[in-house]
Image (cartoon, grey):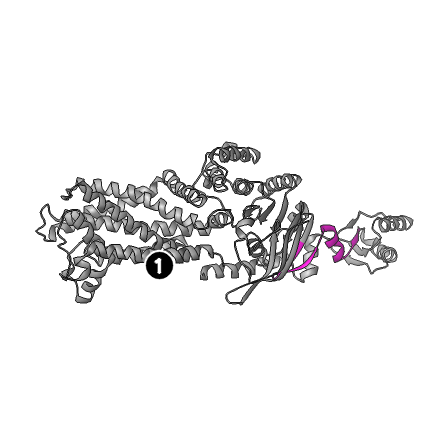
Amino acid sequence: MKSVIAEDLVKTYRNGAVRALDHLSLDVEEGTVLSVLGPNGAGKTTCVRILATLLKPDSGHAIVGGIDVIKHPEKVREVIGLSGQYAAVDEILTGWDNLVMFGQLYHLGKKASIARAEELLERFSLTDSAKRPIKTYSGGMRRRLDLAASLIVKPKVLFLDEPTTGLDPRGRQEMWRVIEELVKGGVTLLLTTQYLEEADQLADEIAVIDHGKVIARGTSDALKKEVGGERLEIVVESQNIAKTMEIVAAVSGNKATLDEGLRMISAPVSTGATALIETLRSLDGAGIHPLDIGLKRPSLDDVFLSLTGHAAEEKIEEVATTERRKRAKK
Amino acid sequence: MSAFKDTMIITQRQLRLLTRVPEVLIFSTIQPVIFVLLFRYVFGGSISTDQPGGYVQLLMPGIFVQTVAFTMAGTASGLAEDMKKGLIDRFRSLPISQSALVLGRTLGDSLLNIVVLAVMGIAGYVVGWRPTSGALSVAVGFIFLLLFGYALSWIGIFVGLSASDARVVQNVSFIITFPLTFLSNAFAPTTGMPRALQYFAEWNPVSTMVAGCRELFGLENQFGATAGSFPSENPLLTSFLYMILIMVIFIPISVRKYKRSSD
């Protein structure tokens, strides 16, 4: 069963001048994690805001937890949790205050709200700082509390909008650990990220979006395959380069390329480990001992580059600037 | 019923913010206290009045109205801050009554007004303010002030939802309320103003509120301009109509704006 279905979502801003979502469709199977991956400004946040009932699309349908988002937003709100760069907690209040308040707003009643708050604080290792105002929290603690606030009523579907953006590596690791635990608990999760590594780490499936459209989707492995299979990479001494290139070309059936600086010869291969073994045998036969050899699978960076024609990171600066300008204008 | 509960929880939050950041309360009262001292001891001496008990009797109702009007800026900037931080998104993603947040905030800010007015009343008493109309009328006067503050807080809500930066909101609110409180009968007779301003001051809701409060505190409205005009003859009724007008306009558009705040 699909827990989230988005069909043909279109959302424009400034009377159509900016097309944030351009017929975007995606779905998430119950109990799985879908990562929506794309650079800043690709439409990730707009997509989450629509699915979380904060924004009405210009056209298209969305169903979350079996409920129509546009027709019954108030019912959808009962089954979702939302956390991320824009859904926040009250910084002046303490962690405890916040969770109890949100518990009460979920109509748990005061006693149950307190019990649930304490349980969540414990689970996210925040008990010690429970009575401190959020503004004294580190970035990682704040995100964990934010996540805790979205879990008060055990949502059927959880939306995490860029849960680790702006965190330092340690904060990110902690956040990943927490999310992985949640996933083990069986929650259906839609997660947006601009970090390829994050999608790879957390998601069952990845939807790559760019300019408001899904341009590719599949498992991390499938996406990597789509972009091209594995590459064989060999580093040898300079005097062996010519011979090695011949061998690699023969084994792979493809033209071998050379990175002179690294003395690295590489070529796409379709037979994986077999190609590796054959190459090693031939090299051995020729009396060549490689300094390094391996099969390299394309990174998600490669995936993005090959799908969009531009690197994911390249775009961020430019879009972030227009985004800021847009905000300032508003 | 649950809409009411949601509203109360948000109101509680407003009050809790007050205990967590007592500076808000201190700054909401320090400014009017400074005004009291300034007008009572600096300008008061040169404003002639035959009011028994002196200028301070006329001054305090003006200060009360101004104080209440200034808290509108707090409502607006607080809400703008919540919008910017993304807290509003969190609230809007909860299964709660969509108007609970704005409603709760206006109620919370009204409770803040009670505290601030109490402090101002004490400050007034210290510098010689003595209402002569009896406890009941004075109480009605303060209720009237609270109602006015409540109506204005809806303008604050609208301003807060319309702008995205809390500091801008603070400035905008100031630009609106500052001239409004001075182009009135609050601190000096309007008769000294140019004709057009006199006319404005006459109909200014701040003036009608001040005149209404003076009446309830047992004073004659000495600072009114054109005798016999509708607002100066019926300050309480006019103020009441203004409050209704403000709420009839600003409650629906604010609630509507809130529900669509991200579109």
Tell me: B156 left or right of A77. Answer: left
Camera-nearest residue between A65 and B86: A65
Q: Which residue is labeled 1 in the image?
A: B249
Q: Amino acid at mark 1?
A: Ile
Q: x and y percent of residue B9 in the render?
A: 42, 41
Q: x and y percent of residue B173 in the render?
A: 33, 55
Q: Quadrant of residue A168?
A: top right
Residue range of the region highlighted in magenta in the rendering: A207-234
In the displayed structure, B65 sits above or below A321; it is above
Camera-nearest residue between B100 and B67: B100
At horizontal 66% and vertical 39% (from top left) the residue drawn is A184
Camera-nearest residue between B247 and B68: B247
Tell me: B198 left or right of B104. Answer: left
Q: x and y percent of residue B237 in the render?
A: 22, 55
Q: Quadrant of residue A316?
A: bottom right
Q: x and y percent of residue A135 in the render?
A: 46, 41
- Is residue B41 visible to the viewer in this orientation of the structure? no
| Residue B1 part of the magenta-drawn span | no
Quadrant, the N terminus of chain B: top left
SS class, disc 1: helix
Q: Return the residue found at the far front.
A: B1
At horizontal 82% and vertical 48% (from top left) the residue drawn is A290
- Is residue B8 visible to the viewer in this orientation of the structure? yes
